[in-house]
Image (cartoon, helix red, strand yellow):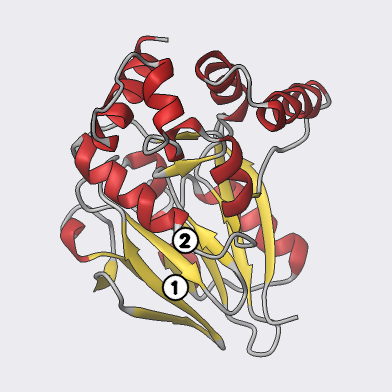
Amino acid sequence: MSAEVRQFLCASDNFGVLVHNPATGATASIDACEDGPIVAALEREGWTLTHILVTHHHDDHVAGIPALKARYDAVVIGPAADAGRIPDMAQGVREGDAVRVGGLVATVIETPGHTQGHVSFHFPAERLLFAGDTLFALGCGRLLGGTAADMWSSLSKLAALPEDTDVYCGHEYTLSNARFAVGVDPDNERLRARAAEVEEKRRRGEFTLPTTIGLEKATNPFLQAADPAMAHRLGLDGRPPVEVFAELRERKNRG
């Protein structure tokens, strides 16, 4: 196995994620909400933190960096557009850049929308995507720094990845996303089955992630803004996908 992934909660609903390369011992934290849960996960596994890959500058994704940097001297890598907003960032990356974690290689995908500088990390050989707050299970991030056009373009890029790609997201928002999704796509049988599964998993206290690109394409309404059927359900027949997406995002905001 070229990569081992561990997922755990930080704060109330943030996910911490570690990516480990057994061949070299290199270990990356995807974002760093707070240091305590990350240190605990590293110690459980006997791993040493070597990298912190940052998707965006929001405090709930970077607050733990200074303590982790002081403890492990890990290399902090994040979006070049957020230089000055991410503590201790040593390397700024842009679209198409390669990031190495030992023998693992990620490609940087610029995914603005939630923030203007947001990036996602795609490890193609391992079929892994770390999407931060751009793509969620059955949802997407709020527009807090970018436009609807930015986010629709970003989601379209992620949807074009191989369908068997495992997707790790920044938060456990799937239950509320599922309820919204069923409301705007009530006849989607696969979605209804997934929503029931999500309800049961959350009742048992289980995580709903990772998801996959294929599952999101089949059930996530935000990835279906180009589908004429979705436009029709929203009363937007003939309107461009970005307008359909914007209406979906506004409805979710109001919900």
* Of the pair 74 and 118, the residue shown nearer to us: 118
Percent across and percent down for residue 47 are: 68, 72
* Of the pair 217 and 138, the residue shown nearer to us: 217
Residue at 17 percent across and 59 percent down: it is 81
Q: Quadrant of residue 99?
A: bottom left
Q: Is residue 150 above or below residue 28?
A: above
Q: Say whether marks 1 and 2 touch (CB < 8 Å).
A: yes
Asked if residue 89 lies left or right of residue 198, the reply is left
Residue at 72 percent across and 38 percent down: it is 207
Percent across and percent down for residue 248 are: 36, 23
Residue at mark 2:
68
Residue 31 in view: no
The mark nearer the N terminus, 1 or 2, is 2
Kind of residue at badge 1 = Ala
Q: Secondary structure at mark 1?
A: loop
Measured in 3D between alpha carbons, the distance from the residue under mark 1 to the one under mark 2, in whole angstroms, is: 7 Å
Quadrant housing the C terminus = top left
Kind of residue at badge 2 = Leu
